Structures are given as structure tokens and as C-alpha cells.
Image (cartoon, helix red, strand yellow):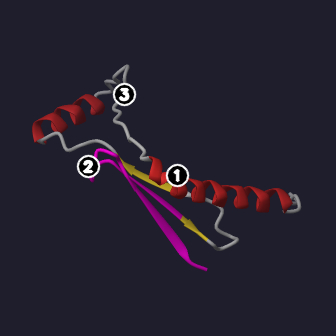
Amino acid sequence: MSRHEDLILCDCFSTEHLMIFLYDDDPDWDRVYIHTHLNPDRGFWKRLWQGLKYAFGHRSVYGDFDEMILRPRDHKKLQKVVDILKKIEKRETSKPPSKL
């Protein structure tokens, strides 16, 4: 079978705001993988400070988040991923229960 990738770039057109969907036509392939990269490069000292805080157990109440602005024209890519997930669900529900 063949593997597929769909890329969705944020509406701000920053290549740091990118979502990659990976899936396969193979019936044994039962997952859709999403790779995201949202955090911009902050510079060495800021990353070092964040790393030290993390190493000593500091947790921000807000977390480290960014955003992804989806464009209306990306709906076809998202729908394709939803359709793949529906196929996977249908295959899983039609399988006979495994004997333990």
C-alpha cells in the first residue's frame, strides 16, 4: 500500500506553524499520526532558562502553547483525515473479538 502525507500551514504563513498528517492505505495501518511544530525559536538564553526551570520541576499554570490558524481551504485535507479515521473505526468494529 502507499503512505500519504498532508501538510497544513497556518494562515499566518509561518513555517514554524505547521501540521503534518501521516497515514496509509494498508488495512493493517490503524492510526493517523499528527506532527506539529508550533513554538517559535526563542533564542539560546531563553531556551536555556526554560530548560533549567523544567529540569527542576517548575510547571507553568498556563503551559507552553501556541496556536494554529486553519484556513477554510484546508477543510478538504481535514475531511480526508476524518474519512481515514472512519475507515479505521469501521475495520476495527467489524473484526471478530480476539480470544485471550
- Separation of marks 3 and 1 at Cα, in angstroms: 28 Å
Question: What mark, if any, has residue 62 been given in the picture?
Answer: none
Amino acid residing under circle 3: Gly
Amino acid residing under circle 1: His
Q: Residue at x 37, y 22 (%)?
A: 62
- What is the crowding at mark 3: few (fewer than 14 residues within 10 Å), some, or many (at least 20)? few
Amino acid residing under circle 2: Ser
Taking depth in this image into account, of 35 and 5 the one nearest to the observer is 5
Mark 2 = which residue?
Answer: 14
Q: Residue at x 84, y 62 (%)?
A: 95
Magenta-drawn segment: 1-22
Taking depth in this image into account, of 32 and 6 the one nearest to the observer is 6
Taking depth in this image into account, of 28 and 89 the one nearest to the observer is 89
Mark 1 = which residue?
Answer: 75
Q: Residue at x 46, y 47 (%)?
A: 72
- In the picture shown, does residue 35 fall above or below 43? below
**Is mark 2 in CB contact (under 8 Å) with mark 1?**
no
- What is the crowding at mark 2: few (fewer than 14 residues within 10 Å), some, or many (at least 20)? few
Check disc 1 and report its element: helix, strand or loop.
helix
Question: What mark, if any, has residue 63 been given in the picture?
Answer: 3
The numbered mark, 2 or 1, whose residue comes first in the sequence reads 2
- In the image, residue 100 lies at what x, y percent? 86, 57
- In the image, residue 83 lies at what x, y percent? 66, 58
Horizontal relation, residue 89 to residue 30: left or right: right
**In the image, is residue 10 part of the stretch drawn in magenta?**
yes
Marks 3 and 1: which is nearer the front? 1
**In the image, is residue 37 part of the stretch drawn in magenta?**
no
The numbered mark, 3 or 1, whose residue comes first in the sequence reads 3
